[in-house]
Amino acid sequence: MNFLNIEYFLVAAKELNFSKAAEKLYISPQSLSTHIAKLENELGVELFFRDHPMRLTYAGEILVKFGQDILDKKNRTLDELRDIADSKRGKLAVGISHIRGLVFLPLVLPRFHQEYPGVTLQVLEAPTAKLDNALANGEIDIMISLTPFSNENVETVELCSEEILMLIPDQVLDTYYPDTKDDVLERLNKKLELSLLKDCPFMLLHTGNRVRTIADKVLGENGVKPNVILEVENIETLLELSRKGMGITFYPNSLESYSNFKKFDGLNVVKVPYGKKQGIGVGYMKNRFLSQASREFIRILKESMQNM
C-alpha cells in the first residue's frame, strides 16, 4: 500500500475539494486526482462521489476512520527501527510554555546537545491548550507543563512540585484597605478569603493557559467575579506590572528561580491551594512510541533539576 496516497486522500477528504487540497499539498489537482485514482484501484472501491458538492462514499468514510491509524502505525514502526539503527541520531520536538522555557530549557538543552549532537531539537513555545493539542496530534514528542495533564492518554514523569502564588501589590492594599491591610493579609493567608478582593483590580493570562484556568477556578469557587483590567500572554509581563502596583495576579512558584533577583519587591505573596497537588512534569502519549532521544532528554532534565 502506498502511504503517500493515503496521506493525500486524508487531506482531500478533509477539504472535499481537490483544488483546495492540492494547494495545501503543494501539488496540482491533476496529480492529486491521479494519486486518489491509484488508491481506489488498489483498494477496489470508490472513495468519493465526484459530483457537486463532493462527498465521501461509505468506503471513503471507513478509510477516513482508519487511515490516520495506518499512518501512525507506519510512523511508529519507522521510528522504532531508526532508534534501533542509531540511537544517537533523529529528531526531538519539545513543547513548553514561553516562560517555563526560560527556566527549564537552559538546564537541559546544553547538556543534551553535548551528549546527543546528532539529534535535531525543535522547541514549540505556546500556551498550554495549544501544547495539549500539539502533543495529541503528534506535532511534539514530549511536553513540559503543570500536572495533572488534561489528556488522560498522557503518561507523566513528575519533575517537581508546584504551587500557585497570588501576588498582591502593596499599592492595591493601600488603596482598598488603607487602615486594615495587615488584617486582610492575615485572613487571606489563613482562610483564603478571596471575597475581600472582589473590588480590587486583577491582571490575568489569556484563557487557555493552565495558570489562568486555575485562577478562574479558584476565584469562581470562592464566589469572586474578578475585576479584570488586563489580560496578556506573557506571565513575566504580569509580574512586572504587578510590581508596579497595577493589580493582583497569579504566578507559579517554579518560576521563582528565574524571577528571584527581583525579590517580589512591593508584593505580598499568598499561596493558593488548588485541588490535587500540582506539579511540573514531562508528558508523552501512552499509545505512541517514545524514542531513545526522548527518554534521554527526560533523564537529563530530571538529573539537572535535582542538582539545582
Image (cartoon, rainbow, N blue to C red):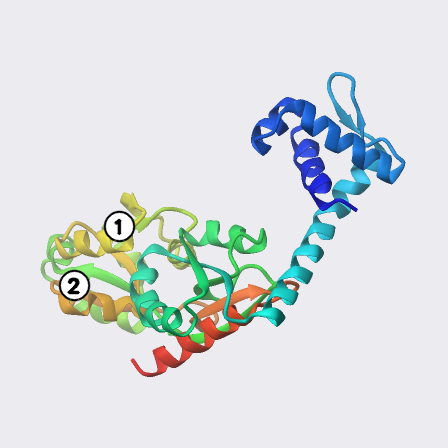
Residue under label 1, please give it.
202
Measured from the top left, where is residue 118 in percent x and y?
45, 65
User: Tag 2 or tag 1, which sits nearer the N-term?
Assistant: 1
The amino acid type, in three-letter code, at marker 2 is Leu
Taking 70 as reference, is 17 above or below it?
Answer: above
- State which quarter of the image contains the C terminus: bottom left
Query: Quick one: which residue is furthest to the bottom in this view?
Result: 307
**Left or right: residue 234 compared with residue 276:** left
Measured from the top left, where is residue 112 in percent x and y?
39, 71
> Is residue 17 visible in the rendered structure shown here?
no
Q: Label for residue 21?
A: none
- Give how far apart the Cα atoms at labels 1 and 2 are: 14 Å
- Identified at 11% across, 63% down, the residue is 266
Query: Quick one: which residue is furthest to the right in this view?
Result: 44
Query: Quick one: which residue is furthest to the top in this view?
Result: 52
The amino acid type, in three-letter code, at marker 1 is Phe
**Left or right: residue 158 compared with residue 79:** left
- The count of marks equals 2
290 vs 223, nearest the viewer: 290
